[in-house]
Amino acid sequence: MDVQAPESLDATNEEAPATPVRTGRARRLAWDLFAVVGYVAAAFGVTAGLWRDVHGTMLAALGGSDNALFEWFLAHAAHSVTAWENPLFAYSMNTPDGVNMMANTSVLGLGIPLTPVTLAFGPLVTFKILLVFAMAGTAWGWYFVLSRHLVTSRLAALVAGAFCGFAPGMISQSIGSHLQIATQILVPFIVWRVLRLREEGRAVRNGLILGLLITYQVFIGEEILLLTALTCGVVTLTYIAMRPRAALAVWRPFLGGLGVAAGVAFALLAYPLWFQFLGPMKYHGLPFEPERYYADLASFTAYARESWFGSDATAKGLAANVTEENTFYGWPMVILVPLAVAFLWRRRLAARLTGVAIVVFFILSLGSEVIINGHDSGLNGPWALLKRIPPFDLTMSTRLSLVLIPLVGVVLALLGDRLWGPRPLAPAVEPTEAELAGKHAAPVPTAAPVRTPWRPSDLVVRVVGTLAVVVAVAPAAPTDLSIIKPQPLPAFFTSGTWKDYLPEGTTVMPAPVPYSGAMDGARWVANTRMGFATPGGYFIIPTPDGEGAQFSSTPRPLSILLRQVNRSGKVPAITEADRRSAIEDLRYWNAGLIVLAPERTNAAPLQAALTELFGPPEQVQDVVLWRTAKLTGGA
């Protein structure tokens, strides 16, 4: 037999289950395996459309632009490994300036370990694998921590983990290809290790582990690390307010371990963070106004587009776009959570801490002005003050609502533990002051525990509570993600023919020059193992004056002209001045080839515009191209 106890996440509460629950190792491993298989199966079910044609489908949100961007991120990570180049900077896009990858959401912590997969199957397959991992891994991480350290019911942990990995907000971020947001597998372990800092005599070990987790999370997503830190801060302050004596008893090991964690993280992250904030192509601020992204109060009771009870109609006008539907829980969940917190308030300290945090982040997510169903209520939120303070000035208030997902998951775990867990064993002795202060992982009774008797009302509570959980969770469950079929990758690139046409040391200019609305050129780069560089792209770089930030490269006359043709399908009058400036742009980009894929949208007017500028093209395999040597005066 094996002894498994809910550990220190709730051990400071005298009314929490205080006696270890004896479970067989085989049974515990069976639950763990079931959780892995179940979560992975669910993730494959949600992404089923992407796997029907592995190389020919991508996520539909925003026209697939972010999907293509993350293909390039993953290809860059693999290239940096095989070419032994600095992964913190990329030269393959935005030529001649390049891109600071530490200052972008490049998910190096995911892309570098999967380099063999990217090299073998391409970055699009790697992206899809990571999307499954993001959902299933996040769910399993929460299941593991909750089942080991908070609740005794494996079923409760299983349901809570599923919610944490597949909640509407997580699915919304997955739809947007935001791997840096959707991949939260380290978050529950970071939270757990923060709580373990209370242990006496283990400051170095606990701090070292936490520091390593923080470091790795930076290379997955800094924004999620910030949200995790804010949550831990709110919970810690609430704990101090509720249990000042217990907090006072553990402040030394806690701060000691925190200091060790900060030292480890600083030592490991000093150069990457210097590179991010002071290195080449650094930027200041954001290329958009963060205040535009807030949580509409009415969205909390609505259902997201990609949920069972959701549709375009239920979510219309309640979020900036489909990738930021972070707060769509539905009325049943909005009613269940506060009732569950109230029901558990006296029994579990974790419920009290979580309930306070839910209120705090709910209010903060509303932004500076409270908007209800798209209309200004006239009420100001506390964000109006916080938005002026770093790092809140660079934070979208709607992203703070993502904190609510694991907090609601914890409430579901605690409620499920009460509903589906074994009858609590009453300890034969009261916990000591040291145990209440968190100096032990869990109070251990010195005499045989006594099982509390069943009452008829217990069955009623279990049945009603279970139905309430089902009614609250099921409607918000995800449907399969919307997909599109992108333009096929030209054989000119996939076969390697481009190598015979591109002069050494020059770049390829895709038509149109890559930007957020036309990322096919970025996919060409990503799927040729970064064999060449291109101008343009979709990322965050500094403005020309270096004082701000912008998406994509500063438009030049040729890129502006081709972007207009791509959007309108019409060719403007081409003047001699246009031809001269176009030649100058080719020289600036050191372009050796101009390449157009005839299958893309508005290819005909694009070809017509380029022909007027540079003369007739050559047809090579499935592309048309212009060699620029004679145009620019090259060899």
Image (tube, grey):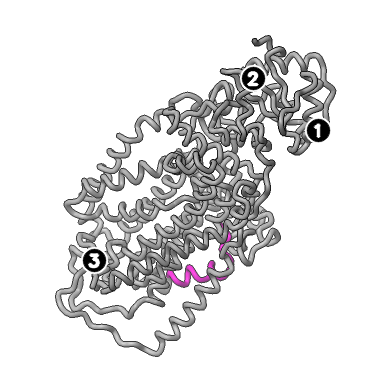
* Residue 324 place in picture, x, y as percent: 59, 51
The part of the image, by quadrant, that contains residue 495 is top right
The part of the image, by quadrant, that contains residue 124 is top right
Taking 505 as reference, is 571 above or below it? below
Taking 159 as reference, is 210 above or below it? above
Reading the image, the residue beneath label 3 is 442
Taking 8 as reference, is 219 above or below it? above
* Label 1 residue SS: helix
> Who comes first in sequence, dot 3 or dot 1?
3
Q: Residue 586 versus residue 345: which sits nearer the camera?
A: 586
* Label 2 residue SS: strand
* Label 3 residue SS: loop
Reading the image, the residue beneath label 1 is 604
Q: Amino acid at mark 1?
A: Ala
> Who comes first in sequence, dot 3 or dot 2?
3
Reading the image, the residue beneath label 2 is 591
Q: Residue 535 versus residue 222: which sits nearer the camera?
A: 535
Q: Amino acid at mark 2?
A: Ala
Asked if marks 3 and 2 touch (Cβ < 8 Å), the reply is no
> Who comes first in sequence, dot 1 or dot 2?
2
| Chain part drawn in magenta | 327-341
- What residue is at 48 percent from the left and 42 percent from the top? 392
Q: Amino acid at mark 3?
A: Ala
Dot 3 surroundings within 10 Å: few (below 14), some, or many (20 or more)?
A: many
Taking 338 as reference, is 452 above or below it? below
Asked if marks 3 and 1 touch (Cβ < 8 Å), the reply is no
| Front tag of 3 and 1 | 1
* Residue 467 place in picture, x, y as percent: 51, 78
Marks 3 and 2, how far apart in space? 66 Å
Q: Main secondary structure of the magenta part?
A: helix
- What residue is at 62 percent from the left and 49 percent from the top? 59
Judge from the rendering whether residue 551 lies leftward or rightward of residue 3; answer left or right. right
